[in-house]
Amino acid sequence: MEPGSSVTPGDASPDYELLAPIGYANSSRCGYCGTSSRQTKRYSYYATATSLSPQFYQKLIDRCWRRSGTLMYRPNQRQACCPHYTIRLDSSLFKPARDQRQAVNRFNRYILGVQYIKEAARLYPRSRAQTKKRDNEFCLADRIHEAEYSHLKTPPEPAHKLVVTLEEDSFTEEKYAVYDNYQKVVHKETPEDRTRRSFKRFLCNSPLRRQTVTDPDGRKRRLGSFHQCYRIDGDLVAIGVLDLLPDCVSSVYFLYHESIHSLTPGKIGALYEISLAIEEGYRWWYPGFYIHSCPKMRYKIDYTPQFILDPQTLAWDPLDDEVLRLLDRKPFVSLSLEKQAAPEGIANSTDPIAREGISTATPGENDDDDDAGDDDTTTSLFRSDMPGIPSLADMEEVDLDHIPLKIFPSGPLFETSDLVSWDSKTVRDWPSAKASMAELVAALGPDVLDCLCVDSSR
Ligand SMILES: [Zn+2]
């Protein structure tokens, strides 16, 4: 193992992906449309994860999964008042739009101050070629760091000292203070809801194993869960919670202190994350689930070009006007199914399915905050019509008998066939341990069997 890499403490089998099934269930609330619990349709398959490699989690987010702390879920886009779609930006093709460039310029001007800008221009003049290049192109990876203290020529001193660091996703009181302010001001959460415990559970509790990988060109990259911390004059003012995976920077959450609201911190944070993907070679930026029916989510697609994951085939399609028009017309969109239904071209199809039960009420809840197990409407995943899930017949062909089981925190692993009554059941006997394993493997994808270990030790 490389120096600097680490595994979850106390983990006896670091090579396995440690998960435990929860099941397929509806969530009793939807923070996106604000429907009452009886109308809420937010079905997902849930599991908990104790230890995952970034490589494995990359695979999962490319199969519609996402995590909230250690809770993993894969939403059913067909059974949803507000369907969740996985989208991603190709950072190598990203060109910041006018308002995004302006946000960076405004932010840098605030940090540096007029005095510094004037003085620095006099003391360290740009060459004619440099000035020309700067006027003609906006290089995000250059501009985004322009006001950071470590990039400045001093003297003179800037108006404010900006320091941006990538830190472990551990809990500190300094971070908690920003969380407390953000949840209070932006999400109007009550004091009982914005506890240290909820902050830890939601944003400081990742199952991802942190590691450093060396790319073929010798470049080192960090993988795992991190907090990108923004400090102005020594005060922590914003945190980007990030999962750094082999092929992406995945944005988990972004929070900031109200004192910097006017500096459009959300935009600055997104641009920092995209720049990280460009500079360090992660390539893709995942802004989190996109919910078309939720106006507050639209900002996510202001960064282009983006791609949308087809929930049925798990293939990526350009998130273009054609897809957006389809999403305007109906909640569930799978481009592959559209093409099957209308081989003559999607633009001409006049699918009468109306958007059901979707209001455009402003959500008051966290993006990607999720509660599982708070309701009782569980059913079999195989009776859910969830897109992209193998059928029961498919699962009967998969050998589920030898999945390692971690029953005790330490000591030998067992396997599924050691379970009492394992042999007397089939995957069709729901509920049963065998049916539960079949659901987990179907939701993850049967190709993960080799590295999966079911962890029921916690
Ligand atoms: Zn909803």
Image (cartoon, rainbow, N blue to C red):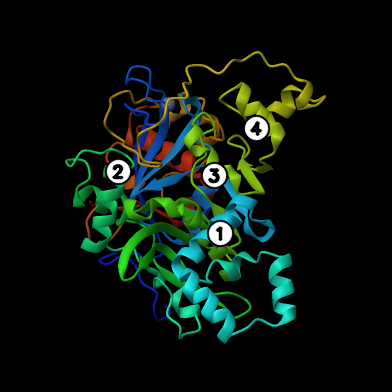
Which comes sooner in the sequence, label 3 or label 2?
2
* Residue 4 point in image, percent of width and height: 39, 78
Residue closest to the eye, 334 or 251: 251
The numbered mark at residue 185 is: 2
Ligand 1 falls in which quarter? top left
- Crowding at dot 2, Cα within 10 Å, few <14 / some 14-19 / many 20+, comes out as few
Looking at marks 1 and 4 on the same chain, the residue that comes earlier in the sequence is marked by: 1
Q: Amino acid at mark 3?
A: Lys
- Marks 2 and 1 close (CB-CB < 8 Å): no
Spatial CA span between label 3 and label 2: 21 Å
User: In the orientation shown, which residue stands out farthest toward the left?
Assistant: 192
**Residue occupying the point 59% across, 50% down:** 99
Residue 220 image point, x, y percent: 52, 77
The residues bearing labels 3 and 4 have C-alpha atoms spaced at a distance of 13 Å
What residue occupies the far top of the structure in this picture? 352
Of badges 3 and 2, nearer the viewer stands 2
Provide the residue designation for mark 1: 274
Amino acid identity at mark 2: Val
Circle 1: element type? helix
User: Front-most of 340 and 37?
Assistant: 37
Sequence-first disc among 3 and 4: 3
Residue 280's place in the image compared with 203, above or below, is below
CB of residue at label 3: within 8 Å of ligand 1? no
Mark 4 sits on what residue? 324
**Label 2 – label 4 distance at C-alpha:** 31 Å
Marks 3 and 2 close (CB-CB < 8 Å)? no
Q: Nearer the viewer, residue 266 or 228?
A: 266
